[in-house]
Image (spheres, rainbow, N blue to C red):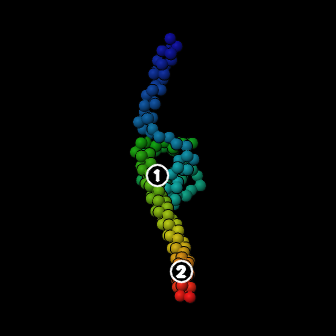
């Protein structure tokens, strides 16, 4: 019984309509600090002393109209289109960063591989020299042994 009474009171007060209106007009709400922390890296040239100034400059960068957002005492209220624009900018920003990081990683892997192959090539040259000397010595010893056997057989 109390739940039904409470529900009718909420309807009479217009809470549901207020919620629907807010969701339709400015569904996105962020604290200034969170907004700035999230989107300022994208807009590096934006500077200001007060949070509201910074937010206004960011909004000017994406060409947002004043009717598309509201500045409250602690929060910024945005409509869906503005939020989507900002999120798209953020996505593109991190996409570019990710591509650059991938290129750097590829270049570093190539550098490391080249360095490793250069070391292996040097070692293989050294090993070739060592083996060549060893093989020559071995062949020389075999030839010497054959010659000595022939000399012994002649005697």
Tag 2 secondary structure: helix
Q: Nearer the viewer, residue 36 or 133?
A: 133
Q: Nearer the viewer, residue 113 or 94?
A: 113
Q: Which residue is mark 1?
A: 90
The image's mark for residue 59 is none
Q: Residue furthest top?
A: 1
x then y, percent, for residue 16: 45, 26
Going by the image, does 64 lie left or right of 120?
Answer: left
Q: Toward which corner of the image does residue 119 lie, by quadrant?
A: bottom right
Mark 1 crowdedness (10 Å alpha carbons): few <14, some 14-19, many ≥20: some
At x 51% / y 51%, what residue is drawn? 39
Of the image marks 1 and 2, the number of the one nearer the N terminus: 1
x then y, percent, for residue 3: 50, 16
x then y, percent, for residue 129: 54, 79
Alpha carbon separation for disc pair 1 and 2: 76 Å
For the residues carrying marks 1 and 2, which lies nearer the camera in this image?
Answer: 2
x then y, percent, for residue 63: 42, 53
At x 44% / y 55%, what residue is drawn? 95
The answer, for residue 65, to whether it is visible in the render is: no
At x 49% / y 57%, what residue is drawn? 43
The image's mark for residue 142 is 2
Tag 1 secondary structure: helix
Mark 2 crowdedness (10 Å alpha carbons): few <14, some 14-19, many ≥20: few
At x 42% / y 50%, what residue is drawn? 88
Q: Nearer the viewer, residue 79 or 111?
A: 111
The answer, for residue 15, to whether it is visible in the render is: yes
For residue 55, above or below residue 15: below
Q: Residue furthest right?
A: 49
């Amino acid at each position: 019984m109390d739940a039904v009474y409470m529900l009718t009171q909420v309807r009479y007060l217009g809470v549901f309509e207020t919620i629907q209106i807010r969701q339709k007009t400015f569904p996105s709400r962020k604290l200034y600090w969170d907004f700035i922390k999230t989107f300022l890296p994208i807009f590096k040239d934006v500077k200001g002393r007060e949070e509201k100034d910074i937010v206004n400059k960011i909004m000017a960068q994406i060409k947002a109209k004043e009717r598309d957002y509201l500045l409250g005492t602690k929060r910024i209220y945005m409509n869906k289109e503005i939020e989507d624009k900002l999120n798209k900018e953020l996505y593109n920003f991190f996409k570019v960063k990710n591509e650059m990081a991938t290129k750097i990683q590829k270049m570093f892997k190539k550098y490391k591989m080249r360095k490793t192959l250069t070391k292996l090539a040097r070692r293989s040259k050294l090993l070739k020299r060592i083996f060549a000397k060893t093989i020559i010595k071995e062949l020389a010893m075999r030839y010497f042994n054959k010659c000595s056997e022939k000399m012994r057989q002649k005697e």
